[in-house]
Image: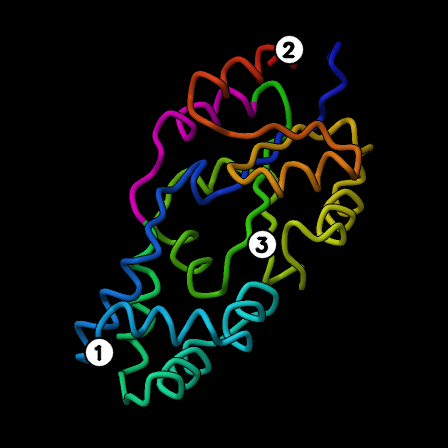
Amino acid sequence: MSSGVEWVLFDLGGVLVEVEQPKIFSALSEQSGIAPSEIETRLKSAIHLWNPFIEREFTPAELAQLVNGLLGSSLAEQGVVDAFNAELGGTIAGTAKLLPELRKKVQVGCLSNTNSIHWDRLLSAYGFMEHFDRRFASQILGCAKPKGEIYEKVENLLGAHPRAILFFDDRQENVDAAARRGWNARLYAGHDGLLRDLAAAGL
């Protein structure tokens, strides 16, 4: 391939899956009777929840215990899991439809800041996940974007030169960090731009 691209990696949230974080707080509010704004404040101020949640694997029981501790509630484990999964919306069809054909030309994977709860849901409910040759999740790797460590780990696991990786993410800070590592990193801002960037790479 003239461009030298061997791998195309996609972020998930905002690129392949619609995400709406406020739905978490609304769902927890319905179960607890606490205002969504208060839930958001309590959860987002808890550094022992959000950062570890995407950098190590959590069981549903651990998550429920943390959330109940922060809210002073006694929500059922499944209710907490369902609330967190409410953030995940529909498939972004324009991107997902490209994967099967793209995979005929180059190896395809995902690199996402996610968590154990979402990962289980993504693997069971989103068909496009089957079209990845490799799947990289922050909680499994033990680090998250935009830390340089995660790009280095993925690069080594792929056995690929940095310039051989074409990466799409909808957050500029993640794109910038990948570019500093030497990856061909592109900001995802919609389907048309994605097509242009793939075409420019000979794909």
Q: CA distance from mark 1 to mark 3?
A: 31 Å
Task: Name the main secondary structure of what is drawn in magenta.
Answer: helix
User: Would you place residue 73 above or below residue 140 in this image?
Assistant: below
Q: Position of residue 186 (x, y in %)?
A: 61, 28
Q: Position of residue 167 (x, y in %)?
A: 63, 32
Q: Which mark is residue 137?
A: 3
- Which mark sits nearer the N-terminus, 3 or 2? 3
For this rendering, which residue is in front, 49 or 132?
Answer: 49
**Residue 181 lies in what quarter of the image?**
top right
The residues colored magenta run: 89-103
Q: Secondary structure at mark 3?
A: strand
Q: Which residue is mark 1?
A: 34
- Which mark sits nearer the N-terminus, 2 or 1? 1
Q: CA distance from mark 3 to mark 2?
A: 27 Å
Within 10 Å of disc 1 (Cα), the crowding (few <14, some 14-19, many 20+) is: some
The nearer-to-camera label among 1 and 3 is 1
User: Would you place residue 40 above or below residue 74 in this image?
Assistant: above
Task: Name the residue type under label 2.
Answer: Gly
User: Would you place residue 174 above or below residue 95 in this image?
Assistant: below
Task: Name the residue type under label 3.
Answer: Ala
Within 10 Å of disc 3 (Cα), the crowding (few <14, some 14-19, many 20+) is: many
For this rendering, which residue is in front, 125 or 3?
Answer: 3
Q: Which residue is mark 2?
A: 202
Q: Position of residue 5 (x, y in %)?
A: 71, 22
**Residue 149 lies in what quarter of the image?**
bottom right
Q: CA distance from mark 2 to mark 1?
A: 52 Å
